Amino acid sequence: MPLFLISYDIAEKDAFEYGPLWAKLKEFGAARILYSEWIVTGDSASEVYNLIGPLTQQKDRILVQEIGRNTMWDKLMISDDDFQDWLGHARF
C-alpha cells in the first residue's frame, strides 16, 4: 500500500477539540511524525482524506499526499529506524 503524509493546520488554542481526529488516526495505525503531521498507509489520498476530513473543522487546513522514494527527514517524533520501516513497507 502507498504511504501517505497527513499535514494539518489547527490553532494551538483549539487543540483540545481534536481528540476524535487523533483517535481515528491511531485507530487506522497512523504514526505521528511531527506535531501536525502523521503517516499512514492506504489505498489512495482520497480514501485517507475521507476517513479524517469529517473530523476537522471548516477553519482547518489539511493536506494528504503520497510519500515517494525521494524522501529526506531529520528529528522526527519517531525513530529513524521506525520511519525507515514505514518506507520499507510502502508500495511505490
Image (spheres, rainbow, N blue to C red):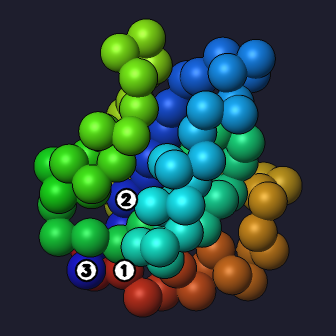
Q: Distance between the residues labelled 2 and 3?
A: 9 Å
Residue nearest the viewer, comparing 31 with 56: 56
The amino acid pointed to by label 1 is Ala
Nearer the observer: mark 2 or 1; the answer is 2
Point 79% across, 59% down: residue = 77
Q: Which residue lies furthest to the top in this view?
A: 59
Residue 46 image offset from top left, x and y in percent: 15, 49
Residue 91 image offset from top left, x and y in percent: 28, 80
In the rendered structure, which disc, 2 or 1, sits on the residue that comes first in sequence?
Answer: 2
Q: Is residue 69 visible?
A: no
Picture disc at residue 4? 2
Q: Is residue 44 visible?
A: yes
Contact, mark 3 vs mark 1 (Cβ under 8 Å): yes
The amino acid pointed to by label 3 is Met
The quarter of the picture where the C terminus appears is: bottom left
In the rendered structure, which disc, 3 or 1, sits on the residue that comes first in sequence?
Answer: 3
Picture disc at residue 90? 1
Q: How far apart are marks 3 and 1 (CA)?
A: 6 Å
Residue 12 image offset from top left, x and y in percent: 74, 21
The quarter of the picture where the N terminus appears is: bottom left
Q: Name the residue under label 3.
A: 1
Which type of secondary structure does the marked residue at label 1 adopt?
Answer: loop
Which type of secondary structure does the marked residue at label 3 adopt?
Answer: loop
Q: How many neighbours does mark 1 have within 10 angstroms: few (below 14), some (14-19), or many (20 or more)? A: some
